[in-house]
């Protein structure tokens, strides 16, 4: 984990992730992700949280957290699936939450070398525990992890 960055490009891609998050139909938490090739700042893939393609995202399913959590594909997961092997060496921007532990596993396995997200609210569970686990895995796997608050 590194201190906040002043990079204009990091800010631009975080703003884009925020915009993409708005595409989510989740009534409580809209998450967006952008995978970027750092060498040329080319956008490789984007993703937002939602149900799998072809699965009905009705209000009753989205409103029932126990059902929604079992059906939703996280923004990071969507972006990584769309990126495929092009994620290797990229930076992943995700907002408004940092990656959960399960997404951290996929991020590491995809070959992403850098992750940028906002600072989590460490007083709220399960996000506090999830972000601690993800941070530890990123550290051990040498994936650079940066908190950037807009």
Image (tube, rainbow, N blue to C red):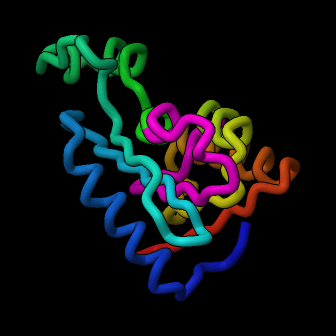
Query: Residue at point 55% right, 55% down?
Result: 92
Give the image location of residue 115, x and y in percent.
61, 58
- Side (left or right) of 102 relative to 141: left
- Side (left or right) of 60 relative to 18: left
How many numbered discs sit on the rendered protein? 0
Q: Is residue 81 magenta?
A: yes
Query: Residue at point 87% right, 49% down?
Result: 140
- Residue 65: image quadrant is top left
Q: Is residue 92 above or below residue 29?
A: below
Name of the residue lying farthest toward the left = 59
Query: Residue at point 12% right, 20% down?
Result: 59
Q: Is residue 27 above or below residue 39?
A: above
Give the image location of residue 134, x and y in percent.
69, 45
What is the span of residues highlighted in magenta in the rendered image? 79-101
Q: Is residue 38 magenta?
A: no
Assign the C terminus to one quadrant of the image. bottom left
Give the image location of residue 68, x and y in percent.
32, 19
Please state which of residues 112 and 40 is positioned toward the viewer in this rendering: 40
Please state which of residues 139 and 109 is positioned toward the viewer in this rendering: 109
Assign the N terminus to one quadrant of the image. bottom right
Name of the residue lying farthest toward the right = 140
Please state which of residues 44 and 77 is positioned toward the viewer in this rendering: 44
Query: Residue at point 13% right, 16% down?
Result: 58
Give the image location of residue 86, x and y in percent.
58, 45
- Residue 28: image quadrant is top left
- Residue 37: image quadrant is bottom right
């Amino acid at each position: 984990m590194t201190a906040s960055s002043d990079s204009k490009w990091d800010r631009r891609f975080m703003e884009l992730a925020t915009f993409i998050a708005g595409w989510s139909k989740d009534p409580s938490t809209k998450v967006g992700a952008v995978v970027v090739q750092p060498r040329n700042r080319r956008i490789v893939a984007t993703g937002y949280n939602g149900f799998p393609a072809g699965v009905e995202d009705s209000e009753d399913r989205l409103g029932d957290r126990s059902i929604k959590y079992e059906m939703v594909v996280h923004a990071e997961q969507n972006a990584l699936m769309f990126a495929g092997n092009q994620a290797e060496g990229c930076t992943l921007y995700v907002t408004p939450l940092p990656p959960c532990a399960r997404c951290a596993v996929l991020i590491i396995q995809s070959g992403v070398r850098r992750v940028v997200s906002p600072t989590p609210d460490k007083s709220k569970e399960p996000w506090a525990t999830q972000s601690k686990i993800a941070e530890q895995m990123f550290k051990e796997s040498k994936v650079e992890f940066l908190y950037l608050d807009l």
